[in-house]
Amino acid sequence: MAAHFGRRMRKGAATTAVAAAAVAALSASQAPGVTVDDQGRQTTADATPSPEETAGGATGNSPYYTDLPPLNSPNPSPSAGTGPVAPGVTEAGIPATVLDAYKKAEAALREKKPGCNLPWQLLAAIGKVESGQARGGRVSADGTTLSPILGPQLDGNGFALIKDTDNGAHDGNSTYDQAVGPMQFIPSTWEWAGRDGNGDGREDPNNIYDAALAAGHYLCRFDWDLSDRGDLNRAILSYNQSTEYLNTVLSWLEYYRKGTHEIPDGTGTLPVDRSDGDPVRPSPSASATPPAPKPGPRPADKPGGAGQSPKPNTPGSGSPTTPPPTTPPPTTRPTPTDTVDHLEDAGTAKLTAMAGDPFTERISTRAETDAGKAVARVRIRFTVFGDTDTTFAGGESVATVVTNASGVAVAPALQAGEKTGAFAVRAVVVGRDIPGVAYQATVTERAADTLVRTGDTALTCTAGGEFAEAVEVKATYGGAAADGVAATATLITSADNATENDKGPYFKDAAGNAVRTLNGLETDADGLLKLPRLYADDTAGTFLLRITTAGGATLTVELTVAAAATPSPSPSTSPTA
């Protein structure tokens, strides 16, 4: 679960001396710039992500479990027949199916996003804090939780206010959203972050394989490198924007890195303490739809002391009878999202990029009231539509950004894929059914504006022979190497006639036949293009080879074929007298 609402004293805390020793031990093992607080949680500087990186977090900043790892190291792992298990070793165990899901997600991200360097121990740390490893591994054989794991409804009553975005499809609540599953995704985040981790054709937030893979992709967006401490902190904070959350996850990450082991499903240790102060955990048989909160103050807020109700005055008790106090109905003030009347383009320029390049222009959208006033702190969801492989930075096709004080949300930069053509990006207000704003974008083919030969040796050959040097050229665009640019090479008739010549130099195809036009050529990563070797027929003279690229770059190369040497006649033999 996710956002912190005030530190809680940990139940059963160790003595001051033991705690101090644990803090010292943890501090000694950390990277530079990392400190440990008096509860054993780690923290570091430079850990604040930007608003576009958080946007409410994967969990909508729902509550989370604050239990800390044991003070002793989890090594060595227990094995059968070795005697009693040392205190804390049980806590290091991770249910078999849950552990398998984390490791499979790490392997998938190593292939899809190798630069992210996602450790499975980070998924385990988040899974511990969010759901106690799927309630101690209470999952089916395919990884689906045996009963729903739901956070409290995000109704603004002590939590964030996120109105229903999925019509209750995932959380069973058609009024407000709730964090769902072992990794506690809110439905609006799962809509774009969801993945199929177990290959059953479904993206189910209640399945640990799906949820772990989705969490991995979520943590690896924005091209973060999780081996870098700053990026690691930003990724964790983007999951739940709370410093206490960050420190708790870092503590479990360090604990699991020291050693862990597999335990049977359903036998994991269940967490106790929660960040919202509610010690009651949902039972495995809890309904998918939680009961609505009761109006009025909590018992601790009533007169008569914490958790105690005042004794009622009764007739004949010597005190005047007074009616019990009534609680006025709560006043519901409109949220910023409620006040949005429409969205406007905030001055986005033309969206065009070459295949494989980032778009230099970013989409800007402004949320306004019906009077045209800016609305801050509103979540805007940007979605890429159309037949395109263009994505936002980080490889996702959806991004959610919170509007700033000017009511403007700036989408992450778009990264063009290899598919050329037009597509659209649509901006909508999360939690409101009002018209969105559509932006048209175009990806053009890779191009070059300049072609030059890489060598200056004259290209000569004798008739019927083979040119000693192959032609190599370099393509650039704006002075930079133009990679992946399509090119054509043709032996032309003359400088003014680009039709194919029917005599003179030629290339050979795979069967050894003469060809004088090569299509489908492409420059390499350095913008270089090396043509196949050239041959000459028996025609002498000067010939031209013309190379053209997408974008209009053209280079004409001169080829010279010298006549073959005429053999000298052999001396004749005198006739016999």
Image (spheres, helix red, strand yellow):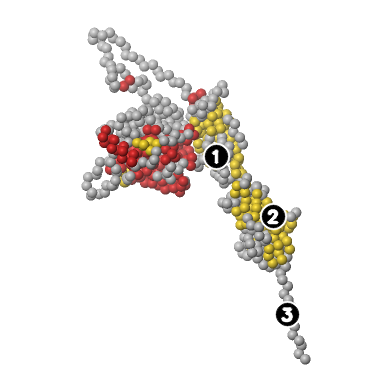
Q: Place residue 59 in its image quadrant.
A: top left
Q: Which residue is mark 2?
A: 556
In the image: residue 386, left or right of residue 565: left
Q: Earlier in the sequence, mark 3 or mark 1?
A: 1
- Camera-nearest residue between 256 and 436: 256
The answer to whether residue 360 of the structure is visible from this angle is: yes
Element type where label 1 sits in the image = strand
Q: CA distance from mark 2 to mark 1?
A: 37 Å
Task: Give amino acid for label 1.
Answer: Leu
Residue drawn at x 24%, y 44% is 85
Residue position marked by numbered label 3 in the rendering:
570
* Residue 136 visible (yes or no): no
Which residue is at 38% across, 34% downward? 245
The x, y position of residue 103, in whole percent, is 38, 46
* Residue 290, percent from left and from top: 37, 30
- Rendered image: mark on residue 114: none
> Which element type, helix, strand or loop, lies under badge 2?
strand
Q: CA distance from mark 3 to mark 1?
A: 76 Å
Q: Is residue 434 left or right of residue 56?
A: right
The foreground one among 362 and 170 is: 362
Total count of labels: 3
Q: Amino acid at mark 2?
A: Thr
Please state if 66 lies on the left or on the right of 56 as rendered.
left
Q: Nearer the viewer, mark 2 or mark 1?
A: 2
Which residue is the extreme one toward the right?
577
Numbered label attached to residue 414: 1
Chain-order first, disc 2 or disc 3: 2
Q: Identify whether 165 is placed above or below 454.
A: above
